[in-house]
Amino acid sequence: MDAERLSICPSILAADFLHLERELARVKNADMIHFDVMDGHFVPNISFGPMIAEQVKATSQVPLDVHLMVSKPEDFIPEFAKLAPLYITVHYETCMHLQRTLSMIRDFGVKPGLSLNPHTPIQVIEHVVPDIELLLIMTVNPGYGGQAFIPQMMEKIRLASRRLEGTSVVIQVDGGISLENTPRVVEAGARAVVAGSAIFGSDDAEAYIETMRAAGLKASTQLI
């Protein structure tokens, strides 16, 4: 992943599932398709599972980015790993044996990601930095799309960026992301953003993605 290029990851949670093939065609210039898996236990919602992910993979050439918002991620990892996603991300809050879970993802040939809920401090990653390739900072409480960005999370992104300086770990942010706040999260240290409602709710999703990417590139180059 290019350090200066902002990766745009549309969350299909916000897509029109009656016309999913058409929706995927609207975001064919995305870097990853973000796939939010919800089990109704860890988060108060149920979304979709491997069968839908398989159809998405068969329809789109954009790599999958699987985000497991589930109580027992170990039960889901093998099935999603069969689809060869770019990342499988699990939540710190759900993993009793975190390094074992991250190693399980890597053993399947997939890049392991770790997600933190808004209230979970950055310090918890201290002993697993070598085990992850992506850190997903939730900027809303997970479970529903369309929520507003929690302002306090901007400082959390900055803290993560300082801690991960000199590593290859990608900081991804998810929740309330739009064209308006993309430059600020990039300035804070994000290199990948997940956006659902903002992208799929736009009249021209492909153009919206390009505009977000350009705004992110401008923000990142100003930091050099």
Image: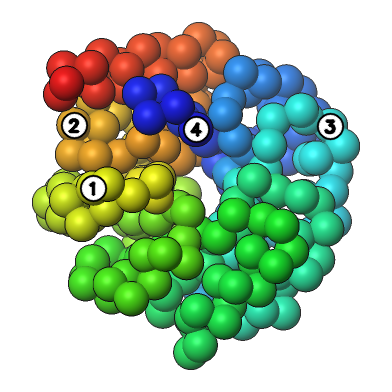
The vertical placement of 184 against 205, above or below, is below
Residue 129 at x, y percent in the picture: 37, 65
Question: Which mark lies nearer to you, 4 or 2?
Answer: 4
Question: Label 2: how many residues lie within 10 Å, few (<14), some (14-19) or many (20+)?
Answer: many
Residue identified by numbered label 4: 1
Three-letter residue code for mark 4: Met
**Sequence-earlier tag: 2 or 1:** 1
The colour scheme applied to this rendered structure is rainbow
Question: Label 1: how many residues lie within 10 Å, few (<14), some (14-19) or many (20+)?
Answer: few
Residue identified by numbered label 1: 165
Asked whether, in this view, residue 180 is left or right of residue 202, the answer is left
Residue 172 at x, y percent in the picture: 39, 45
Label 4 to label 2, Cα distance in Å? 18 Å
Three-letter residue code for mark 2: Glu
Q: At numbered mark 4, what does the secondary structure look like: helix, strand or loop?
A: loop
Given residues 105 and 177, the one toward you in this image is 105
Question: Which mark lies nearer to you, 3 or 4?
Answer: 4
Kindly identify the residue that appears in the image at 20 percent across and 57 percent down: 163
The vertical placement of 130 against 10, above or below, is below
Three-letter residue code for mark 3: Thr
- Residue 187: numbered disc: 2
Q: At numbered mark 3, what does the secondary structure look like: helix, strand or loop?
A: helix
Kindly identify the residue that appears in the image at 23 percent across and 47 percent down: 165
**Sequence-earlier tag: 3 or 4:** 4
**Sequence-earlier tag: 4 or 2:** 4
Residue identified by numbered label 3: 59
